[in-house]
Image (tube, grey):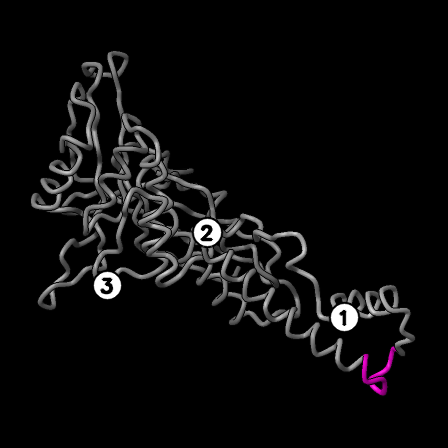
Amino acid sequence: MPHADLSLLPVPTVEGLDLTLDEEHAIELDWLRNEFGWRVANSPADPAWRATRMFAARLTEHRGAVRDAMKRLTLAYADGPYLDHVGVTYFRGAVRHAGESDDDFRDRLAHSNGLVAVGLTGAWYEGIARRVAGVADARAVSRGADHVPPEPEGTVRIYVLADETLVADGATLYPRGIPDATLVTAVRDAATARDAAQQLDTVIVEAAARQRWDATVTLTVAPGAASAAVLQAARVRLAAYGARAANLGMPVSKTLIAAAAASGEGVSEGVVVLSTVSEDQVPVVAAVEGIAAADGVAPEPRNLVVAAA
């Protein structure tokens, strides 16, 4: 389920904790002058100036430590043990999986925002699913009678995408992120536990499907730019976009691809050819304008090519 981009949130601040050394020193000097009528010179030659400078430096350092500690109590900036405490305190006792990195744990917590409410929402079930070890993403939908084919009210389908980076005994546990029956069962057990599900809901858990796609981006490099460096930077940006778009229910479009590949310096324009790839034994490639977001489907970048015009 898409969630807020934590990197776009403003850095939390508290009034009075963000003073610079010079600002704090000026306050101390003014206090001496106003409180005692001292004539303190604005020069290191004055002992009072040096003493207040040292005091201001220590106070600024202390305030910086307090400010940093406060930031690390938020999901966006917490790391290490701070992030562990955020998970336990604010996300219903969520704990880090063995070997789970700060970024992966933070992303899982961000997706589990429904857990702070009293359930029965898609976000609630998605959060429950993502707490199961091995789950990379989950999407819960209730289709109802208007869907074709219709489904009874109270039916919740949870689609699960596995962590394709997990390895055991030298073998990838979930190739392409497709969960096996054991992982699907584990999610079903978690989502139907007495304290997890609404008793009137019918919960169905299914493995996610993948939609493979190829993209070729032809860039016009601006005159005077280093072509090789520009193309390499574009490849990095395109790969990063492909990774971000690889979750459940995410759309892929030529516009978004062009924005990712052609957003750097030295590029005047980009032309995109986007194709989908079938899952047949002999894959069929079809040129498309985009891949619409679909329940239970996660886009999967296959061949991403960046070339100069």
- Is 202 placed above or below 158 here? above
Q: Amino acid at mark 2?
A: Thr
Q: Residues within 10 Å of mark 3 (few under 14, many from 20)?
A: few
Q: Secondary structure at mark 2?
A: loop
Q: Which mark is residue 74?
A: 2
Q: Which mark is residue 294?
A: none
Q: Nearer the viewer, residue 151 or 12?
A: 12
Q: Is residue 134 magenta?
A: no
Q: Residues within 10 Å of mark 2 (few under 14, many from 20)?
A: some
Q: Which mark is residue 99?
A: 3
Mark 1 → mark 3, Cα distance in angstroms: 46 Å
Mark 2 → mark 3, Cα distance in angstroms: 22 Å
Q: Nearer the viewer, residue 187 or 89?
A: 89
- Is 142 placed above or below 240 here? above
- Is 108 placed above or below 150 here? below
The answer to whether mark 2 and mark 3 are in CB contact below 8 A is no
Q: Foreground mark, 1 or 3?
A: 1
Q: Amino acid at mark 3?
A: Gly
Left or right: residue 131 versus residue 288 is: left
Q: Amino acid at mark 1?
A: His
Tell me which numbered mark, 2 or 1, is placed earlier along the sequence.
Answer: 1
Q: Which residues are magenta?
A: 42-48
Tell me which numbered mark, 1 or 3, is placed earlier along the sequence.
Answer: 1
Which image quarter is the N terminus in? top left
Q: Nearer the viewer, residue 247 or 99?
A: 99
Residue ID for mark 1 = 25
Count of all numbered marks drawn on residues in the image: 3
Q: Residue at x 49, y 61 (%)?
A: 69
Q: Residue at x 21, y 28 (%)?
A: 157
